[in-house]
Amino acid sequence: MLFLIAAGLTLVFGVMNFVNLAHGSLFMVGAYFAAWFAGVFGSFWLGLLCALPATAAVGLVIEVLVLRRLYAKDHMVHVLATFALILIFNDLVRIVWGPLPLPLDLPTGLAGAIKLGPVPYSSFRLVIMLSGVLVGLLLWFLVTRTRIGMWVRAGANNREMAIAMGVNVKWLYTAVFTFGTVLSALAGVMLGPFVAVEAGMGDGVLILAFVVVVIGGIGSVLGAAAGALIVGVVDTLGRTALPALLSAMLPTAIATSLGSALGSMMIYLVMVLVLFWRPSGLFPANS
Amino acid sequence: MKVLFPRPTLAWVLLFGALAVFPWLATLAGQDFYIGVVIRIMIFAIAASSLNLILGYGGMVSFGHAAFFGLGAYAASIAVVHGADNVWLVWAVAAVVAGLSAFVVGYVATRTRGAYFIMITLAMGQLFYFLFVGLRQYGGDDGLRMPARPALGFGLDIGSEPVFYAVVLVWTLLMHLMLARLVRSRFGLALEAVRENEQRMGAIGYSTRQYRLIAFAVAGVMAGVAGALLAMHNQFVSPKMLHWSQSGTLMIMVALGGMGRLHGGFLGAAALLLLEEVLSSYFSYWHIYVGAVLLLVVMVSPDGLAGLGRIFRRAPAAPSGRGRAP
Amino acid sequence: MNRWAAPKANPEVRSAEGAPVSTALQIDGLVKRFGGLEATRDVSLQIEAGTIHGLIGPNGAGKTTLISLLSGYLVADGGSIAFFGKPVQQLTQQARVRVGLVRSFQITSVFGSLSVLENLQVSVQRRHHRSFGFFAAARADRRARDEAAAIAERVGLAKQLDTRGDAMSHGMRRRLDVGLSLACAPRMLLMDEPMAGMGHDEADEVVALIRSLTPELTILLVEHDMDAVFALADRITVLLLGAVLASGTASEIRDNPDVRAAYLGEEGTA
């Protein structure tokens, strides 16, 4: 699921050299739309179906009105502008939908659990994983087998060459950005039932997505997948195995406090280590 | 010769003079509350200026600068909690802790540039954030209270608002002068050249990484002192001070005020904090307006407010912070 | 005052009777690979002090790679580089600048928001000062500023001291770029296509400037502008696909059948 967000982010980053902090906000908007539509129609799936194009439209509007003018400028400007968008969106959703979190219920068909051997596993979580894999395959297919995908890879690899070869850059950028938005929104919808759909829900996720992108290498979908996997594993280990390990070695009070601190820090430590060893990430798109 | 070395203007002498008499005026007018507001502005002015040094002058987009701000605050608070009663000692501790951390972070971060630099400073900032969230014995997520402000000596009671105001004002003046000296020095010239064209600097024989690292460390010390002052002002510190959104706020201040302009940090801090004061009293959802203003400024005037102000008389076109694409 | 140009040791210039010259640059068997691609293949050449040595070849021949290897921006995979007898292939770019081996750039590379004087001052001050100079005001650095002004004069920018680097014409910026390199007090300049993008008059000025730099300086000149190369160069080396095709005087190269076929023939007249 982290992969979904990271994939969109890395494409925007790689192809357009654009640092998009608002990616987390689109995640949030997707979740909000889904919760709203689901409430209106009474169905999770309809909520999903409507939320995606709605969020895509929002993304499109942002891209055309604001972001287009900023591509040529330096990263600093991107950071500031998209940070401004975060501020705007965080308040906007509260203005439109109120300050309280919106409920988004699991679809009735998948609310239960499936038994995988002896372990009951939430069926919805399975669906999330499956969709992640499906999207991954779809992306792989798109990027490596289609003409658009070739343009995207060319753009990520060497922008000047791509422009020189006649790729319609403006249209491509819009397409990539919108696609990234949809992925992010999908992630938001999928995650909606598990976390509170509220203002600011995208911020924490955004940071993690950036960590994933940087570890995996900017511009590379494969990198996003690898990064998401690594981050997921490290995060889980950090929160389960590490405290257990520490309490075996140290007195409980210190172990719990140190454990929780270290657990959240693990991912960032890993990122710093990866960057130290490979300053461009694991599978960078640029040669 | 006018591009980098403006003459100190009358406007700024007047401004500091005005700040000096402000507390008396405020008390006379019965608006004591605003003394606290101005103290906050001055403290953030120092912090924003420290970011301006590396961001505006050095061209390094650091998204983890709030970590040094918070480290200074925590270092000061923890020192007081453990019995330090001398404000000079506390300031020294804050400066050293923040400076050393900045050196370490800078050492790692200056190995990268462009987007990766942004990411790694962000990550390391978050590392410090989670460190303090996890430290339960110092309050963790709830924050840490500073029982009393450490003593100033000289028979002055630093607990009293006017005295504290004067202390902060003196620090602000000192930091401003130091920054002015630094950016107009040979080091400052070289730093700006590194920002403009790092490759060319290497080709004429400069070890550019050293310059960036030193600037980073100095900015860390400045931010640390500012953090200590804020901790003393609120007599409270929480991990939120180190969060990346706080780094973002500092960046907004620098952008609003004018990157790479001497007064950018000060103008920006004043502008943003005053804007927040005004907006929050009228609207419950005021972030959206801050965001809109920021967006407008970014899209219209890349030099921030300082670019517009003519009384501060700077050269026509200002250097803009330049990110290096990987 | 040619303080910026003359190295301490006096390089022997060729005397009328053909007395021995000092070799400024000796390259032997230089190799550079990028993955599977061999960008520089066993390149050997020798440049005598005080001369202008031209380096020509079609696009992709490896000229810029060679310059980068010589300046220290890239590290060679094999071979040796001796600068006035001293091996430098292990030295960093900064160290090479300090011994006097400096490059200028093809895509003009100056400090945009700084004035011409400041541009040159930055380069000069590095040579003058051991310390970082945190509090010494740059404006007060008389020695550096005077020397910077002298260099500006040298490259014909004496009237543009206060102009911003990015506010000048292409030709002026190119001269500033050369000035930046000269401010390092080099003994040898590696010039990467200084004529690129120049109009006719501007090119003439640059040619005159380059010619005026010798015999105090030694110059390796990479160029596409054949008129300039044949006008300036004492000797010329032709690169093709990363390897040396031919080396010799201008007329030798012009008459060389291999060179004509591979390169000059395509360009038309020489």
Image (cartoon, rainbow, N blue to C red):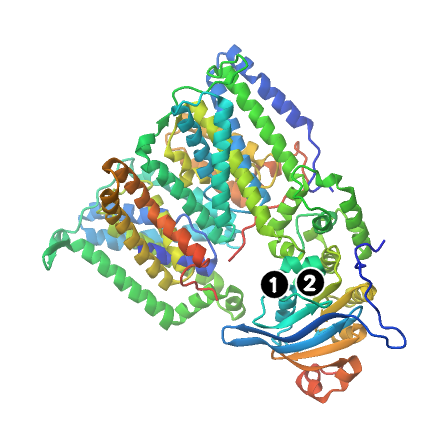
Above/below status of A198 relative to A146 = above
- How far across and down, in percent of the image, does residue A82 sit? 44, 46
Above/below status of C12 relative to A24 = below
Which amino acid type is shown beneath numbered disc 2?
Answer: Arg
Residue furthest bottom in the image: C257
- How far across and down, in percent of the image, does residue B157 sit? 49, 14
Which amino acid type is shown beneath numbered disc 1?
Answer: Tyr
Q: Residues within 10 Å of mark 1 (few under 14, many from 20)?
A: some
Query: What number is the disc on residue C103?
Result: 2
Subunit bearing disc 2: C
In this picture, residue B160 sits left or right of residue A93: right
Residue A9 visible in image: no
Give the total number of marks visible in the rendering.
2
Helix, strand, or loop for circle 2? strand
Give the mark, 1 or 2, whose residue is nearer the N terminus: 1
Residue C208 location, quadrant: bottom right
Q: Residue at x 51, y 53 (%)?
A: B111
Residue A236 visible in image: yes
CA–CA distance between discs 1 and 2?
Answer: 10 Å
Query: What number is the disc on residue C73?
Result: 1
Subunit bearing disc 1: C
Residue C154 location, quadrant: bottom right
In this picture, residue B65 sits left or right of residue B136: right
Q: Residue at x 51, y 64 (%)?
A: A159
Above/below status of C66 relative to A277 = below
The quadrant of the picture occupied by the C terminus of chain C is bottom right
Q: Residue at x 40, y 58 (%)?
A: A10
Above/below status of A49 relative to B55 = below
Q: Are marks 1 and 2 in contact (CB under 8 Å)?
A: yes
- How far across and down, in percent of the image, does residue C152 sit? 79, 53
- How far across and down, in percent of the image, does residue B208 sit? 60, 51
Foreground pick, C224 / B126? B126
